[in-house]
């Protein structure tokens, strides 16, 4: 199968063309961010689920599976984005990031124009900031990370590679979130705390102490979930 002939969606014909790997609900949010910003033209989405092939996401065709990556690269498209979220498993974003990187694509940071991202923050390759999110001064977003709609990342906070700060979550100033962490929707992490690699903070939890790597905490205040 060859890449389809499509008119790239976007507002500026000089903007770079992109493809996305993943065509679920998260892909819809990323496409919205790109098209709303006018800074990219989304040519197609790819997904391993054949049931999605031929569908359209906000007008963007799902052209086929990941085997088409090389064909799109050969057609002159050099940029791509991760179209899968980090819920319930942030490691899926690392897998997709690695696929795109190995295929030769660059993964630019993406921010919805309705987000507030400090000019003094740092954004890693492939990170994504959704509508109404706030990223404050001297915050750092790792590669492949996500800051969901309405979430807040405080000043000097760190969000590690491939971690997902879900919708409405709030990280206080100086919080350090490790790699491949899920901060659930509406959760609050108080200032200066550390969330270890691979940990999960349940939706609506209020974290008042450090969270060890690969553990799950829930509740108000957040406590370790029983095995």
Image: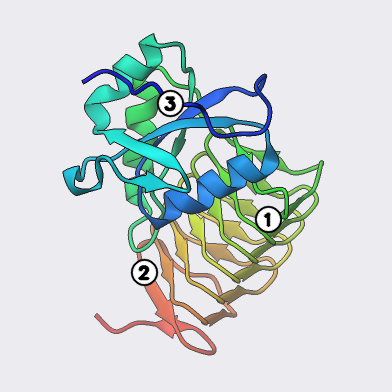
Q: Which residue is mark 2?
A: 215
Q: Which residue is mark 3?
A: 6
Q: Residue at x 44, y 84 (%)?
A: 223
Q: Residue at x 56, y 76 (%)?
A: 186
N-terminal of the pair, mark 2 or mark 1, is: 1
User: Could you tell me which quadrant the C terminus lies in?
Assistant: bottom left
Q: Position of residue 195 (x, y in %)?
A: 51, 63
Cβ–Cβ under 8 Å for marks 2 and 1:
no
Total count of labels: 3
Numbered disc in front, either 3 or 2: 3
SS assignment at label 2: loop
User: Could you tell me which quadrant the N terminus lies in?
Assistant: top left
Q: Residue at x 65, y 39 (%)?
A: 123
- Within the image, what quadrant is residue 82 found in? top left
Q: Which residue is mark 1?
A: 157
Cα gap from disc 2 to disc 1, whole angstroms: 20 Å
> Is residue 162 in view?
yes
Cα gap from disc 3 to disc 2, whole angstroms: 45 Å
Residue 49 relative to residue 196: left or right: left
N-terminal of the pair, mark 3 or mark 1, is: 3
| Residue found at the very far bottom of the displayed protein | 220
Instruction: Tell me the crowding category of disc 3: few under 14, some 14 to 19, or many 20 or more residues within 10 angstroms, Cα based.
Output: few
Cα gap from disc 3 to disc 1, whole angstroms: 41 Å
């Amino acid at each position: 199968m060859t890449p389809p002939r499509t008119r790239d969606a976007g507002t500026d014909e000089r903007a770079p063309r992109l493809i996305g790997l993943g065509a679920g609900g998260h892909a819809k949010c990323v496409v919205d961010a790109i098209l709303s910003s006018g800074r990219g033209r989304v040519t197609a989405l790819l997904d391993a689920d054949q049931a999605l092939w031929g569908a359209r996401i906000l007008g963007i065709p799902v052209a086929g599976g990941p085997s088409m990556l090389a064909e799109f690269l050969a057609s002159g498209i050099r940029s791509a984005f991760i179209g899968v979220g980090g819920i319930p498993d942030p490691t899926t974003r690392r897998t997709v990031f690695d696929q795109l990187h190995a295929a030769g694509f660059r993964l630019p940071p993406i921010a919805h124009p309705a987000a507030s991202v400090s000019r003094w923050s740092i954004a890693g390759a492939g990170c994504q900031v959704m509508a109404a999110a706030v990223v404050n001064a001297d915050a750092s977003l790792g590669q492949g990370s996500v800051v969901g709609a309405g979430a807040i990342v405080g000043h000097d906070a760190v969000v590690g590679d491939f971690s997902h700060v879900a919708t409405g979550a709030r990280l206080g100033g100086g919080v350090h979130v490790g790699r491949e962490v899920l901060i659930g929707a509406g959760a609050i992490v108080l200032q200066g705390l550390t969330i270890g690699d691979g940990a999960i903070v349940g939706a609506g939890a209020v974290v008042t102490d450090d969270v060890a790597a690969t553990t799950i905490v829930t509740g108000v205040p957040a406590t370790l979930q029983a095995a």
